[in-house]
Image (cartoon, rainbow, N blue to C red):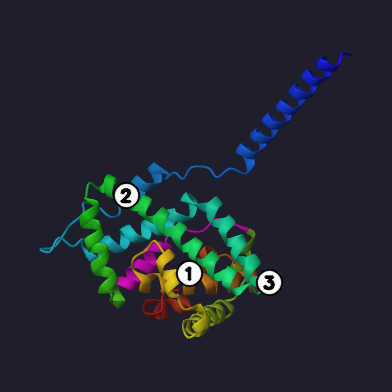
Amino acid sequence: MSLNYKHILYAVAAGSSILIAATIYNKFFKSKPHKLNKNRVLEDLKEVGEVKTGREGIVDKKQMALILGIAQRHLESYSRGERSRLAKIRQVHLSTYKHEAYLCSLVDSLNFEYKCLQEIYDELCSEMKISREAFNESLDFYNKNKDVEFITMLSIAAISVPAKESEMKLKLKDMSALEVAKLAEEIEMMKKEASEDATLKLTNDMKLKLKDPDTANSQSALIEMHVFDLIYEKYKLEKEDVQQIIKENPSLKDSHKTNPI
């Protein structure tokens, strides 16, 4: 076989290997574009109805809670792959005690969720035929004037769709009401301890990297994400499954109104 012919065969083989590798990457590893399930969105928005606004142009309290709850529910499926990847990175840093790297991964996760929520808000506003400006004004209003009633409505709306029947969900179903109550109490205690932990406070450098201009909201989201990272590390339980089973626990209905998980 001539030398030139061998070179051609090697080149073809190399090209085929690259093509195969690219196909495998695109199929299994490349992040798929985020897309909302439009039919499910339209079905969810039926509960909201025609959006009503007050004199100041603020969306009705109950409707706003429903809209934000719908956005939170769709966030999981909208960005499941990337959120899972970011969660794994956080778990590695958390389990290896790389505190600074862990904080950076929390900020990356918060930025990603903020970006996804903005995209979901755009879609919802388009379907509801309201301007994004009016929606933002209402969002700012309720963020600054949260009351118990609004927080309760939001917490219920955000988790009213049952989580998937995963192994973890089935494990939670086997827990007694008392065990679920103890888990809810542990989560609240973790949140309290985390909120008092100076090492979890957003530094000025971290604040500059955050996409959400509301740093108080980001600090609260960071604490919640950290707590559920700890819960996953300890019990291997996902946040959505834990929230759903706690909501379904009759003994926690009263406390859930003032302390939404």
Q: Label 2: how many residues lie within 10 Å, few (<14), some (14-19) or many (20+)?
A: some
Magenta span of residues:
150-166
Q: Kindly identify the residue that appears in the image at 37 percent across and 71 percent down.
A: 215
In the image, residue 171 above or below residue 52: below
- Can you tell which quarter of the image residue 18 is in? top right
Please tell me how many numbered marks the rendered image carries.
Answer: 3
Question: Which labelled disc corresponds to residue 78?
Answer: none
Location of the N terminus (image quadrant)? top right
Q: Which image quarter: residue 38?
A: top left
Going by the numbered disc 3, the residue's amino acid type is Thr
Disc 2 to disc 3, how far (Cα)? Answer: 38 Å
Tell me the amino acid under the disc marked 1.
Glu
On whether residue 239 falls in the magenta region, the answer is no
**Up/down of 221 relative to 113, above or below:** below
Which label sits in the foreground, 1 or 2? Answer: 2
Q: Earlier in the sequence, mark 3 or mark 1?
A: 3
Question: Which label number is shown at residue 96?
Answer: 3
Tell me the residue that label 2 is attached to.
122
For the question of whether residue 179 can be seen, the reply is: yes
Which of these two is toward me, 89 or 185? 89
Q: Nearer the viewer, residue 11 or 31?
A: 11
Residue at 67% from the left image edge and 37% from the top image edge:
24
Task: Identify the mark nearer the N-term, 1 or 2.
Answer: 2
Say whether marks 3 and 1 touch (CB < 8 Å).
Answer: no
**Above or below: residue 255 compared with residue 245:** below
Q: Nearer the viewer, mark 2 or mark 3?
A: 3
Q: Which residue is mark 1?
A: 248
In space, the residues marked 1 and 2 are separated at their CA atoms by 31 Å
Q: Is residue 24 left or right of residue 4?
A: left
